[in-house]
Each structure stands twice: as structure tokens, then as C-alpha cells.
Image (tube, rainbow, N blue to C red):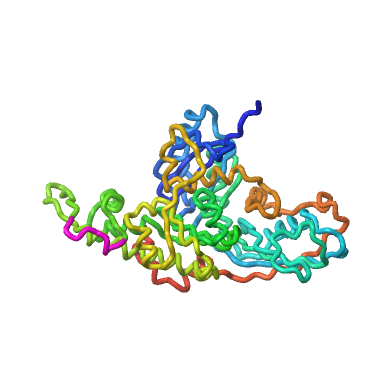
Amino acid sequence: MPMEKTISVIDLGTTKIVCLAGTRTPDGYKVIAACEAPSQGIMRGEVINNQSVLNSLRPLLSELEERTGKPARDVVVGIAGQYIRCKAASSTINRSNKMEEITQDEVDNMRRNMFNSRVDPGEEVLHVVPQSYHVDEYRSIPNPAGMCGGCIEANYRLFIGKSVSAQHTRRCIESAGLRLSKLVLEPMASASAVLQDDEKELGVAMVDIGGGTTDLLIYHDNIIRHTAVIPFGGNVITEDIRQGCEVTLRQAEQMKIQYGSCYVDLAPENKSIVISGIGGREPREVPFRFLANIIEARMEEILEAVIYEIRQSGYAEKLPAGIVLTGGGALLTHLSQFIKYKTGYDARIARPRGIEFDDCDEVNSVTYSCAVGLLMQGFEPVCGPVTEQQMDLEAIFAGVETKTPAKQNKIEKAPKVKKEKTESSGGIGNIFTNIGKYFTEQDNEA
């Protein structure tokens, strides 16, 4: 009987680092072991201090090895960061023999070539997601393989990130004695764990509220249409509470989790939190309504940034499944009611689905959505048919162009690809120019 494959994943979050190992089962996925620790050296989803991250990561890897009985070698890692953006792009090929069937190799090569698209200096194409194909007069074909035609036009969404961010992540993983087998955009990972198939078909926006960033991903007709990383999350709320209530950071986080509400109208009117005095001072009282006012103000700014990105995507009117919330920030009391009231979209809080676990009850929480999603993505083919959402990024981050030799394509003469047309689709970069009011001095300090 063949041994079942075990995959290890690492979620390098701003607030915490999660290490997880699991296998695929006939019914889904099984988590064998999971552990977490507060993160250091990570700011808004990006590794900025390699040694600090290693100080947090190495004890977790030792714990994971002890619990699974074998060391982690190859790992799947998530990447986020405030500079992740997406844009539309297209390419066209003219075929010499229009009566010859289009092969899957031709379709795959068109997608691979998009990894060489022109981007701004210091950026890399992280993912290429096909949207639709046009073959001669036939429009909006999901996959043209098997059809006949003389001209193929392909439309894509390119997901782009900073080269240095990917390099820092890779260097950190290699310094820990591991091999980076796959680098996955964290919004895609979280969506894999929490979204249901009918939601992806109807149209849905997944919002993962983490400590340092808020990730957005939009599905429609089972295709990823847009993603963005908003550069603030739950930590800015905690910082506002710390300053507004004049408490320590630890107290502010505890107040947010235990007593905080992001909807003032639903917060208790005549209740207060008693805060012990420091250095022999008298205890103080903070009304629940006062705390809710602080949280609501900041959550409204995060929500405005999310709605801005949804509108930029062009799918604001195509989300009948509404908004699915996950991540640690989704634990805020009354969040789904607040979203419904402010946006008109239906909203639900989602935990990872389709997973089994024995002694890892903690993975059944919104805070583990990204890590579980990385496990699911780890079992996807590295490079498969055009309908797959994954591509081997290792060669790209090593500085090697992702090209398939003509020999492998079994095509005498590779078709020429016309220069792709690109069209900006919002991306997080536009937030800095269009909604700069959301960035305050407190954001920079968080």
C-alpha cells in the first residue's frame, strides 16, 4: 500500500506564524498537526527581518516534526503584502492551419508566455488566471482545446507582486533548511478553504481580515476575477483602542476580542469595562459604547477600502452570494450585521471546510483559513491544464524565464504571440492615490 503524501505549509502572518501538516483523504483533507506562535519581523504581510522570522519559525518546525514524526522538507508558503495588485491582459495568436485542432499545449503556452508580461520595475507576475477565450467568431470560450480556428484571443487576469517580497520569503524559508515547493497568494489560499462551489459560480467576494492586511478575492462563474491586499487590518483597530482608551497594547487586544463590537447601535448602553489601575492608581471604567465607537470608525474605513476594490473590479453588481468573511478580524462581534447594513450585501463568517482533524481542534477556526487553504493548494498540480489556478513559480523567483521548449510542444513552428494588451483593474496601488484619507499616522505606527 503506497504511503499517503504529507504536505507541510507555513503561513507567515503579521500577527502569528502557523505551521501545519496534512494529507488528502477521499472525503477532503486531514490535518495531522498544527502549531502557531506570535510572529516577529513581518510587517503587513511581508518579511522585513529574516532573523526575527527565523527565531519564531524554528521552534515551530521542531514542534511540527515532533508531532508528525518526520521533519518538514518541502513546504508550501503563502505570500501577501500591501503591494499585491491585479490587472487585465490579453494575447492573440494566428495559426497557420485553421483546420487543425487547437491543442492543450498551445493553450498552456499562451498562459506561460503571460508570465513574461511587462510590469513595473521591481515587480513579478505571480499568478496568471484565464478569464475567457475567443476563437475566430466564437466568443467567451472557457477552454478552446479541441476546437478548430485560425485566431485565438485569450483574456487573463495577472496577479502581480514585488520581486523583493518573494525573494525575502524564499530566503527565509531556505535559511530554515527548507525547500520552497510552492508560493501561493494568500487570498487564493483562504478562498480555497472557505468558499463553496455555488458561491464561486454565482459571484462572491471573500474578505480575509488579518492582523496587518485585509485580503480580498472575487469569484464569478467559477473564475477568479480580482484580488487586492489592503494594507491594514485588525492591528490598526487594536492601536486605536490603545490610544483612545489609554491602555496597554495587550489590554487593548483583550478588550477588542472580549468586549468589542463594530456596530455601535448593537452595543450595550449601560455596561462598562473596568480596567485595573497601573502603579497603584484607581481602576477606570470604559463604556461599551465608547469602545464600539472606536472599533466601528476604523472598521468602516477598512470596509470602504474593500468596497472601493469591489467597484474597481467591475463585479460590484454580480455578487449575489455577497461577502464571505474570514481571518482573525472576522471574530469581531456584530461584524456580519455591520457589513449587511453598510453595503447591502449578504454576509457570513466562514471557517475552513472539508477538513478532518484529530488533536488539532484549533484549525476549525477562522484564524486558520489561510493555512488550511495552503494545504489544499499544495495538493493541486504544479502545472496543469489551463483551468487550473496554479503555476510553478519557483523558476520565476530564481530568475529563470518560464518557457516551454518547442520540442515539448510537438509543433513544428510555434505561433507568434502578439504583444499583450494590458488594462489596469484597480489594484491596491490605486488606494494610495484615490483614498489616501484612510492612511493616518496611526496606520504607519501599527
| 132 falls in the magenta region | no
**Residue at (69, 49) in percent of width and height:** 384
Q: Main secondary structure of the magenta part?
A: loop
- The image shows residue 436 at horizontal and vertical percentages of 42, 71
Instruction: From the viewer's perspective, tell me whether residue 340 is left or right of residue 82.
Output: left
Instruction: From the viewer's perspective, tell me whether residue 114 is left or right of residue 435.
Output: right
- The image shows residue 209 at horizontal and vertical percentages of 42, 55
Q: Is residue 388 above or below residue 355?
A: below
* Residue at the bottom extreme of this rendering: 434
Task: Work out whether residue 52 can be spotted.
Answer: no
Task: Work out whether residue 117 can be spotted.
Answer: yes
- In the rendered image, which quarter contains the N terminus? top right
User: Which residues fall within the magenta stretch?
Assistant: 263-271
Depth check: 136 or 79 in front? 136
Instruction: From the viewer's perspective, tell me whether residue 378 is left or right of residue 33.
Output: right
Depth check: 446 or 383 in front? 383
Q: Quadrant of residue 422?
A: bottom right
Q: Is residue 361 above or below residue 90?
A: above
Q: Quadrant of residue 17?
A: top left
- The image shows residue 170 at horizontal and vertical percentages of 57, 47
**Residue at (56, 36) in percent of width and height:** 23
Depth check: 202 or 84 in front? 202
**Residue at (51, 62) in percent of width and height:** 228
